[in-house]
Image (cartoon, helix red, strand yellow):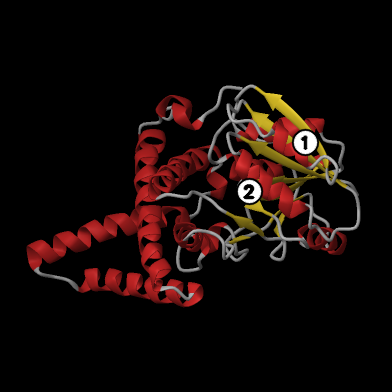
Amino acid sequence: MLFSLIIPVYNRPDEVDELLESLTHSTYKETFEIVLVEDGSSLLCKNIAQNYADRLDISYYFKENSGPGDSRNYGMKMAKGEYFIIFDSDCIIPQDYLTEVDKALKQNYVDCFGGPDRALDSFSDKQKAINFAMTSFLTTGGIRGGSEKIGKFQPRSFNMGLSKKAFEASKGFGNIHPGEDPDLSIRLWNLGFETKLFPNAYVYHKRRIDWEKFSVQVNKFGKARPILNSWYPKYNKLTFFFPSVFIIGFAISIFLMLIYNFDYLLQLYFLYFLILFLVSSYQSKSIKIGYFALIAVWIQFYGYGIGFIKSFFKVIVLKQKPQEAFPELFFKI
């Protein structure tokens, strides 16, 4: 089975260089192709791709900017393979990744899979802290990317596989971003396809490199979720409300302490953050990363929670059209 690796990129030539370099060390014995889709970038990676042409089977395409979902669709249309594997451009791929995917598909074939992410030692301390916030079982990360215990697994497009058959049936990603990957997962379920987590098919994912970009990202995640809930109410879950409840509860705990000198609820929050600090410090073997993890988790919960509340009020309560309420979440295709 020929794998086609689909990589949309927007102004990230240096990251593409690292990604392609990692793929030159793949232990996978069969042929695979790489499809790079330049999504209207001003900083092109064409020269980077040409530097690897003698070691990797690479096709490079430039198109007008229309967002990552449409760029992935474009790449899958141009690909020759029977199975597409989608990466974000800020990923680094372990050498045995394709071998693990091939093994998993042969053991229990599925038309769509997703894999988790990890942090490399070379990542910055902030990147490691953000990775902890986005993947830890102590945050919503355990639900997002590393667990199949809560409902059906929804693959994330930084590390996702999709058969050609499933792509043609579903027409691929929609124009919402972020949120295009759970949207695709749900549409695949409705078409009768299954999704699965491949726990050994992990990638090293850099994610955002500073607090401001991370805050903007998780805020958009929060805005996207009520939109998806309105489209697919069958798949709405209480866990999606958790960051908003967390933020509201924290505000209530501050109010109770200041007005009534009741601090028991605030002590529970303190205990939670203490556990976060201890676990992240232990896992990273760094008190500094443990401290950064507290910042990352707060940004994650606050940004997502506020975005969720705002979107819930506009889309669910006021019944506004998502494209009109949050035009920044929708690319024109």
Give the image quarter of residue 167.
Answer: top right
Give the image quarter of residue 17.
Answer: top right
- Viewer-closest of 182 and 271: 271
Tell me the kind of residue under disc 2: Phe
Residue underneath mark 2: 158
Callout 2: helix, strand or loop? loop
Q: Residue at x 53, y 50 (%)?
A: 207
Q: The C terminus is located in which quarter?
A: top right
Q: Position of residue 131 (x, y in %)?
A: 51, 59
Residues at marks 2 and 1 touching, judged by CB atoms closer than 8 Å:
no
Q: Residue at x 66, y 37 (%)?
A: 8
Q: For label 1, count other residues whose C-alpha is less than 10 Å away and answer few (under 14), some (14-19) or many (20+).
A: some
Q: Position of residue 66 (x, y in %)?
A: 60, 26
Residue underneath mark 1: 50
Q: Which mark identifies residue 103?
A: none
Label whose residue precedes the other's in the sequence (2 or 1): 1
Tell me the kind of residue under disc 1: Gln
Q: Position of residue 331 (x, y in %)?
A: 55, 27
